[in-house]
Amino acid sequence: MGPDTSWRTPVPDRPGLTKRPRARNVRASGDGQSTPARDSLRLAAIIGGLVLALVAGFGLGRAVGASGPGANGPMGGVGATSGHAHAPGIPSDHTHAGPASVDTAVGGLAVSAGGYTLVPASTMMRAGVPAPFSFRIDGPDGRPVTKFAIVHDKPMHLIVVRRDLSGYQHLHPTMTADGDWQIGLTLPATGAWRAYADFAALNAAGAQTGVTLGVDLTVAGAYTPTPIPPAARDSTVDGFTVTYEGTPRVGATHPLVFRVFSSGAPVPSLERYLGAYGHLVALREGDLGYLHVHPENQLYGGAVKFWLAAPSPGRYRMFFDFQVGGKVHTATYTMVVS
Ligand SMILES: [Cu+2]
């Protein structure tokens, strides 16, 4: 399932989204005639196209076409209309401009998007005290969603990070029959935290809508932010050194390749975790815009290869989850996109 079709996944409640804004623009500007009426129609078509492109980039970029364990599902997080999957077999050494790589091609900035609303039971936590965190996702009909697609082995991915981009956690809540998601959560330090619910809702017709919603959680008390570490291409975690190559750019999809070393030697036994050899979340400094990228289905010379289009210049914190010996580790980086 190619990503280029994913963001066009029909959404019955919002039929306009099934249209192809760019094609309309082409027709509108290519007729060679100009009258006031035509001009206003043309303008309407262009504006409509832009709105659709923005909506698609914001809320439906990850609308899921292929899913399930091992599927090389649509990647690019709420990716970008240009953040598209590369199925095995597609030449992977190319780059291409993404005309729709708009600045909004990140997720997690809103508590409600694409008709779906994140409703937490409570957002107040106490530092270092384990507590249940529960929430529901209300759908376009105002009722809690109870059907979710399995994307990378899970129906719901919950990412939690402090707003200074420290303290990253990647959790998988469980759902009750009536749509309440629950997970035990410990926020170790005071301050404001961001929780992202990354999911693909299923409607009655079986259509999937991928959305990442975000909400702030607060831990009362004196707050000392942790400065973002300097940019680096290697990260040490649990005795592993993990490097990455590649330089994401704005408006074009470029490869990012991660290699895991132990005692100076490449680790030969990377394992699949949640159906993929790695999971990459990038959070933008300033607004904590969220990108979640999944890698190519197979290792690439022993390394894990992602495709990423940066939504804008700036600094990002990247969190790379990988598994060795049955244990998940997270390497962290500061990346600068110029
Ligand atoms: Cu997950």
Image: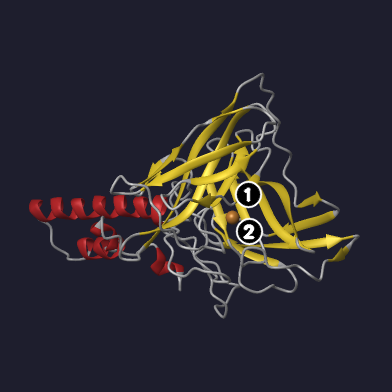
Which label's residue is closer to the chain start, 1 or 2?
1
Give the image location of residue 31, x and y in percent: 17, 66
Left or right for 209, reference 284: left
Q: Secondary structure at mark 1?
A: strand
Asked if one can make out residue 314 in the rendered structure from this viewpoint, the answer is no
Point 30% across, 60% down: residue = 11
Residue shown at 54%/57% (left/top)? 309
Q: Is residue 86 above or below residue 56?
A: below
For the question of whether residue 1 can be seen, the reply is yes
Q: Position of residue 273 (x, y in %)?
A: 67, 63
- What residue sits 58% from the left and 71% below the top? 70
Residue 21 picture quarter: bottom left
Residue bearing mark 1 = 170
Pointer 1 residue Cβ closer than 8 Å to ligand 1: yes
Extreme residue in the right direction: 263
Question: Where's residue 200, x and y in %?
Answer: 44, 57
Residue reaching furthest to the top: 222
- The residue tagged 2 is 279
Q: Quadrant of ligand 1?
A: bottom right
The colour scheme is secondary structure
Relative to 338, is 309 above or below? below
Residue type pointed to by label 2: His
Label 1 neighbourhood size at 10 Å, few (<14), some (14-19), many (20+)?
some
Does ligand 1 reach within 8 Å of label 2's beta carbon? yes
